[in-house]
Image (spheres, rainbow, N blue to C red):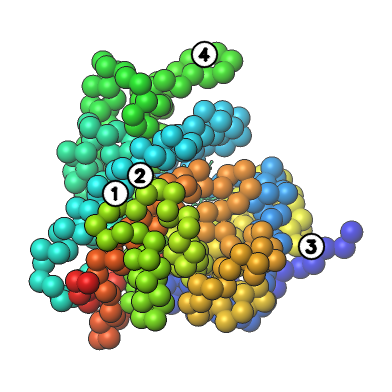
């Protein structure tokens, strides 16, 4: 079989894009896709990065040839250890099987109560503030999603310390994001201020989590939250439960994978609704037609809100929170006809697949109706992959979608959102897709 050679920029050309890449990596990547088409190769010394943006390539990478690759999220290990995001091979398979019940229907019903209570607290806070004011919504979304996940994982024991946990997680994540963007990070054993701050934050996170585990080990009850479920889990063959260290890794993984991504999706959702007042108004009408004014929406009502579901999918298409996925080849593999040797990096960005003009008509426009059942079912399964695909797709998708839907319903029926024209909106593609200067909106009580 003849294989193709991937086009791409020379090392010298790459250098001319370096300062641009530092500000916003999406800009040069977009230019390379525009210039070279659906595949390009970036030389990085001994290894290269092969970037793809078609659903067909996504299927090969995430599903058909996934066995020839591994994840390359080792940079997160100093914080999350060996949880589902970072584990590989047999360990991952065992963990995934054991952890799946965390997101079954019964748990989702428990989470839903937490989501409703946290959202109601946000609505009350916003109602108390001046009725037509402007605010940066990002920190409110982060706090709400962190509280939801902390309560869902460890209901009683962590809810009082969610703020403390949040501050330390932010310090640790900020360190890891910056470290991963540095060619030669200072080794951890050097006592630099940054290294020491990181270690202090991880120590504090460990103290909070181990405290919660210890308290619960003393009084394991029937499953009320994820920690109860985790404590009751047994490995099929050996009958062994998780050690404290494993529990800690799983809890931190869920907190980390679960709160910032959901907050990012929500933040962009309100921005897009504010920018598209007609769609916001139609959504408001749909909500008040289905849900009585003073009552909280029932879980089963959410799936009947057709426009709401389309809006959520369209938001995650335009601004997928995990905008960039990466794999490393563990053996030679052929993707889309390109031969890729062992040890190379493969970049598969949901952002670029979602904005590929060959896959989506008017890809940069916000058109929720494109997710009408018959239109969407005709598309390639991997044309919409905000939650990844294949065996390693997001285990928390049911919780994330429920959270996004509920928070949109409750906020849209209580407030009207408008953009603040003079506020600059710029993407900041870190691990999750944030807004560089935050999203500032004007909200008015309904
Ligand atoms: C809008 C919110 C979310 C988005 C967009 C999202 C997206 C993703 C994506 C794209 C992956 C696959 C990464 C890859 O293949 O390299 C993933 C994996 C994962 N997500 Fe999510 N996620 C979200 C919310 C959550 C929540 C709420 C949780 C848990 C509470 C969670 C837990 C995980 C875990 C543990 C994995 C690793 C799964 C495995 O490898 O088996 N995520 N997520």
Q: Which residue is mark 3?
A: 337
**Quadrant in which the N terminus is drawn:** bottom right
| Residue found at x 27% / y 86% | 421
Q: Secondary structure at mark 3?
A: loop
Residue 286 in the image: above or below residue 322? below
Question: Label for residue 112?
Answer: 2
The reply to whether callout 1 and callout 4 are in contact (CB within 8 Å) is no
Q: Name which of mark 3 and mark 2 comes first in the sequence.
A: 2
Residue 416 in the image: above or below residue 89? below
> How crowded is the residue under tag 3: few (<14 C-alpha within 10 Å), some, or many (20+)?
some
Q: Which residue is mark 4?
A: 239
| Residue found at x 55% / y 63% | 350
Q: CA distance from mark 3 to mark 2?
A: 45 Å
| Residue found at x 31% / y 67% | 412
Q: Quadrant of residue 223?
A: top left
Q: CA distance from mark 3 to mark 1?
A: 49 Å
Examine the rendering and report whether any part of residue 14 can be seen: no
Q: CA distance from mark 2 to mark 4?
A: 31 Å
On the rendered structure, is 336 left or right of 16? right
The reply to whether callout 3 and callout 4 are in contact (CB within 8 Å) is no
Question: Label for residue 116?
Answer: 1
Q: Answer yes or no: disc 1 within 8 Å of ligand 1.
A: no
> How crowded is the residue under tag 1: few (<14 C-alpha within 10 Å), some, or many (20+)?
some
Q: CA distance from mark 2 to mark 1?
A: 6 Å
């Amino acid at each position: 079989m003849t294989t193709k050679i991937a086009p791409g920029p020379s090392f010298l050309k790459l250098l001319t894009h370096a300062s641009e890449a530092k500000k916003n990596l999406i800009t040069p990547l977009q230019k390379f896709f525009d210039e070279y088409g659906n595949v390009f190769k970036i030389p990085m010394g001994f290894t290269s990065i092969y970037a793809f943006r078609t659903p067909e390539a996504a299927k090969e990478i995430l599903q058909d040839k996934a066995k020839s690759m591994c994840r390359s999220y080792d940079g997160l290990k100093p914080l999350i250890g060996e949880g589902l995001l970072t584990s590989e091979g047999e360990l991952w398979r065992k963990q995934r099987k054991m952890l799946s019940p965390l997101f079954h229907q019964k748990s989702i019903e428990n989470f839903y109560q937490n989501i409703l209570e946290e959202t109601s607290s946000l609505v009350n806070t916003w109602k108390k503030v001046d009725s037509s004011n402007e605010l940066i919504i990002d920190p409110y979304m982060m706090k709400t999603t962190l509280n939801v996940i902390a309560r869902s994982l460890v209901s009683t024991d962590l809810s009082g310390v969610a703020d403390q946990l949040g501050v330390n997680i932010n310090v640790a994540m900020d360190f890891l994001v910056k470290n991963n963007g540095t060619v030669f990070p200072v080794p951890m054993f050097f006592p630099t201020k940054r290294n020491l701050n990181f270690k202090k934050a991880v120590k504090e996170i460990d103290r909070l989590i181990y405290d919660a585990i210890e308290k619960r080990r003393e009084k394991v009850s029937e499953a009320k939250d994820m920690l109860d479920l985790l404590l009751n889990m047994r490995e099929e063959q050996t009958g062994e439960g998780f050690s404290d260290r494993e529990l800690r890794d799983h809890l931190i993984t869920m907190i980390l994978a679960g709160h910032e991504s959901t907050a990012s999706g929500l933040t962009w959702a309100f921005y897009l609704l504010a920018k598209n007042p007609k769609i916001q108004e139609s959504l408001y009408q749909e909500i008040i037609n289905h849900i009585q004014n003073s009552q909280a929406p029932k879980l089963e009502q959410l799936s009947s809100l057709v426009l709401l579901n389309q809006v959520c999918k369209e938001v995650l298409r335009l601004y997928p929170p995990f905008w960039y996925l990466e794999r490393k080849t563990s053996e030679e593999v052929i993707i889309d006809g390109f031969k890729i040797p062992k040890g190379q990096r493969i970049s598969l960005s949901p952002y670029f697949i979602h904005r590929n003009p060959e896959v989506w008509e008017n890809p940069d426009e916000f058109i929720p109706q494109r997710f009408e059942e018959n239109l969407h079912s005709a598309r390639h399964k991997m044309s919409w992959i905000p939650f990844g695909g294949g065996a390693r797709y997001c285990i928390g998708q049911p919780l994330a979608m429920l959270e996004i839907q509920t928070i949109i319903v409750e906020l849209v029926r209580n407030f009207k959102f408008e953009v603040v024209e003079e506020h600059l909106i710029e993407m900041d593609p870190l691990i999750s897709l944030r807004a560089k200067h935050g999203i500032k909106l004007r909200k008015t009580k309904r």
